[in-house]
Each structure stands twice: as C-alpha cells, then as structure tokens.
Image (cartoon, rainbow, N blue to C red):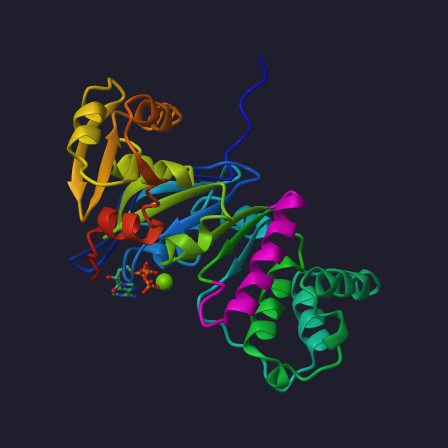
Amino acid sequence: MDAPPIPAVETVGLTRQYGAMTALDSLNLTINQGDLFGFIGSNGAGKTTTLRILATFLAPSSGTARVLGHDVVQEADAVRHVIGYMPDFFGVYKDMEVTEYLDFFGACYKIPTLQREKTVADVLELVGLSEKKGAIIGALSRGMQQRLGLARVLIHDPKVLLLDEPASGLDPRARIEMMAILEELQRLGKTIIISSHILSELQTLCNRVAIIERGKLIYSGPVQGVRDQMSAGLIYWVTVHGDSTAAIALLKARPEVAEAVAVDGQVKVTFTSHEVDPSFLAEALVHGGIKFNGLWEDELGLEEVFLRVTKGDTQ
Ligand SMILES: Nc1ncnc2c1ncn2[C@@H]1O[C@H](COP(=O)(O)OP(=O)(O)OP(=O)(O)O)[C@@H](O)[C@H]1O
Ligand SMILES: [Mg+2]
C-alpha cells in the first residue's frame, strides 16, 4: 500500500500564550492536500494566531505545526516557499500601479525578469484584474484591492494558501467573486485555508471546516457534521388538519420517531437519528387516515447551529 499523502497542515498540541493569556490551547488539526478548508471562530477565538504561526510569523509557545511536512520553526524557509499568506490587514502601496506592485513582489521571490511579466499577467488573469493592470492601486475598489492581495500571494505559485478573512468588508457581490476565485484555485490543485467568523459564508464553499473557540478546537470535519453533532436526529414539521392528537399518537408508535409533540399548532417530529429515511412519514399519516396539509424538514440555520456550538462566547 502507498504511504498516505503528507497533510497540507498538521498541528499537534499547538499552544500559544500571550503573557498569562492562552490564545491557542493544544490545537490538534489536520488539513489534507486539496482541501478548501474553513477555519471558523468568533472574535478572539485564535484564528489569526494559528495562521500567523503556520505562516512562520509567530512562534508557538509549545507543540508543533507542519506545513507539507516542514516544521514551521525548524524549517521556516521551506514553509515560506510553499505558502501564500494573506493577513487580515495588509497595506497596499496606494500610489503604485497594479503591475508594478506585483512585479515588485515577483522580484522579492527572485523570479527572473523575463518570466516575471508572464507570471504577473497570469495571476492578474486568475483574480480577474487583467483590465486593471495599469491602474493606480488607490483607485481600485475594496473588492479589487482584496483580489490584488490574493494575486500577490499567488506570485510564487504556493501550494498552500493561508487567507485570514479575505472576504471581510466586501459587499455580497465582491464576496461571491472572491469565493469563485477560491474555487478556481482549488481546481488548480491548491490547498486553501480560509478563516471567517461566519460559518454560513463558508458552508457551500468549503469541503471541511474546523471551529475553534477560546483557542480550543471544538469541531473538525465536513460542514454537514456540524449540524449532525448539534441535534440528535432529523426534525420534521407536520401541519395537521384539525386536531393533532391522533397524529401524535400514531407517530409516537413508530420506531423511527423519538418524539412527536404539538408546537404552535404544528407537530414537531424528531427522528431517532439522521440516517432515518423520512419517506415513511407521509405514508404513515395517509394510511392512518390523518389529514395534513404541510410536511417539511426543519432547516436548522447553520448560524444558529454555530451560535449553539460556540455558545456565543467571545473574548
Ligand atoms: N499580540 C498580542 N498580545 C496579546 N494578546 C493577543 C495578541 N494577539 C492576539 N491576542 C489575544 O489572543 C486571542 C486570540 O486572538 P486572535 O487574533 O488569534 O483571534 P481571531 O480569532 O483572529 O479573532 P478576530 O476574529 O477578532 O480576528 C485574543 O484574545 C486576543 O486578544
Ligand atoms: Mg483574526
């Protein structure tokens, strides 16, 4: 059997203290290559601290972190080669032209002059800024500046992108554009780690997420798993025509049903698990002679789930 591929990121007992304050508490996190990974937590949860450690800008107090197998402390240079780090706040040189700016960073990465022109054109194309190549940066919209920041971290063709809240402060349209670019980058084979304090924002974008709160990992896995972890079983609502007593009795007798109760004139049905096939529900009601005019799955909002998971704690 082949050896398993090296994880894009692996932290073991990663801890960071600021004085007596523990910002990151024994974080064990594995992110696979090719993931578009959401790193979620409310303000002060420790997202930026983690990303700065992975980007080699901040030393851990204890524990280890590896990026594509390279230790962030022992092999910081190797790590810097394979990552592109976009901080939450970054200065752009407002008086510079777009191309000049990217050419400057290309030179920092020692990309030869001849090749640089093509590299700059390529990354501008990727972030959809080709038409703005001669523009002064200060004249670009916030969304464009954010995309330029992304172009900058792509210049040395890194394998792993660490993006600290790249969509913050963007309007909905600019957000969607940013997300589309990230999906394209994932298709190109990059591993992308994106932080946010809004779980629902990353729900459709990311294949996996981690949630941290007060420096501790409280969930890591697929987005759907967050919801499953928070509720014991699938919930359905039934609007019964007339009295619901018979419907409740009938549903309670079913082995798939954990609970059936009347709530605000409707019947709330909680299944015993998330694996139950809900198709029996309508059939059972019809066979039981129950008249109903509504039947739908409870859509527990992801934000609601997130708030429950994190209990709204902020620091
Ligand atoms: N340089 C510092 N000195 C002291 N405390 C710090 C420092 N940087 C961060 N902290 C503290 O560490 C904790 C984690 O901060 P961090 O910036 O990593 O959180 P975050 O999840 O990125 O939050 P936000 O959503 O606000 O960006 C916070 O309580 C913060 O106040
Ligand atoms: Mg932060």
**Rendering coords of residue 14 (x, y %):** 32, 43
Main secondary structure found in the magenta portion: helix
Question: Where does the magenta region start and end?
Answer: 166-190
Q: Please determine whether, in this image, residue 191 is positioned above or below residue 87.
A: above
**Rendering coords of residue 269 (x, y %):** 24, 34
Residue 179: name its quadrant: bottom right
Residue 296: name its quadrant: top left
Q: Is residue 16 left or right of residue 91?
A: left
Q: Is residue 50 left or right of residue 70?
A: left
Q: Is residue 38 left or right of residue 156?
A: left
Instruction: Report if residue 28 is visible in the image.
Output: no
Q: Residue at x 65, y 42 (%)?
A: 189
**Rendering coords of residue 24 (x, y %):** 27, 50
User: Which residue is more in the foreground, 133 or 310?
Assistant: 310
- On-image quarter of the N terminus: top right
> Which quarter is ligand 2 in?
bottom left
Residue 106: name its quadrant: bottom right
User: Which residue is more in the foreground, 180 or 294?
Assistant: 294
Q: Is residue 120 left or right of residue 263?
A: right
- On-image quarter of the C terminus: bottom left
Q: Please determine whether, in this image, residue 187 is positioned above or below residue 252.
A: below
Q: Residue at x 64, y 58 (%)?
A: 154
Q: Is residue 306 magenta?
A: no
Q: Is residue 174 magenta?
A: yes
Q: Residue at x 27, y 21 (%)?
A: 256
User: Which residue is more in the foreground, 253 or 247?
Assistant: 247
**Rendering coords of residue 203 (x, y %):** 45, 49
Q: Please determine whether, in this image, residue 153 is positioned above or below residue 82.
A: below
